Amino acid sequence: HRSRSLLADDRVTGEDISVVMISVFRDGVNLFQDKSPNEFEMTRFGDTWKGAISQIPVGPNTKFFAKAYKERDGDVIYFGESEALTLVPGATVSLSLLLVEVNTDYNINI
């Protein structure tokens, strides 16, 4: 399989966020489920979170999910997802995700 890379630019302005993690799914399955890590931590640059994910298998119906945490082992406080994308060989995707505040009664299962 050929792979692609992703550059993520996640604008989260909340000062209460300490960690943003990205996961990559295709047809409901985490593409990195058998690897460690299977989620990718972004790095804060002011109010922007950026990072790169490489070795993403090419193919259709690929979605990126972002979860933001106040504390590393805490609850998700912001969540966002991309539209389904088709990843093609040799291209780089630059992606911005809008994260929305998670209602405390809302359960995220991805």
Image (cartoon, rainbow, N blue to C red):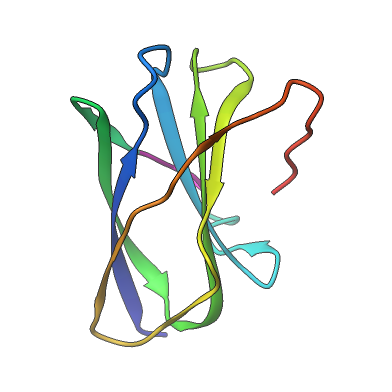
> Which quadrant would residue 5 be assigned to in this image?
bottom left
Query: Does residue 36 show up?
Result: no
Q: Is residue 63 magenta?
A: no
- Residue in the image at 57% along x and 16% along y: 73
Q: Quadrant of residue 41?
A: top left
Asked if the magenta segment contains residue 38, the reply would be yes
Q: Main secondary structure of the magenta part?
A: loop
Measured as percent of width and height from the top left, residue 9 is found at 28, 48
Residue 68 lies left or right of residue 61; in this view the side is left
Count how many numbered circles sit on residues in the image.
Answer: 0
Measuring 75% from the left and 44% from the top, which residue is drawn there?
109
Rendering coords of residue 64 (x, y %):
50, 58
First to last magenta residue range = 37-41
Question: Is 28 left, or right, of 44 in this rendering?
Answer: right
Judge by depth and name the residue closer to the eye, 100 or 23.
100
Percent position of residue 103, x then y:
71, 26
Image check: 108 left or right of 59? right
Outermost residue on the left side: it is 45
> Visible in this render: residue 79?
yes
Vertical position of residue 98 compared to residue 104: above or below? below
Query: Where residue 98 sits: x, y (%)?
Result: 44, 46
Relative to residue 15, is residue 87 depicted above or below?
below
| Residue sitting at x 73%, y 39% | 108
On-image quarter of the N terminus:
bottom left
46 above or below 65?
A: above
Relative to 99, is 27 above or below?
A: below
**On the picture, is 76 further left or further right than 92?**
right
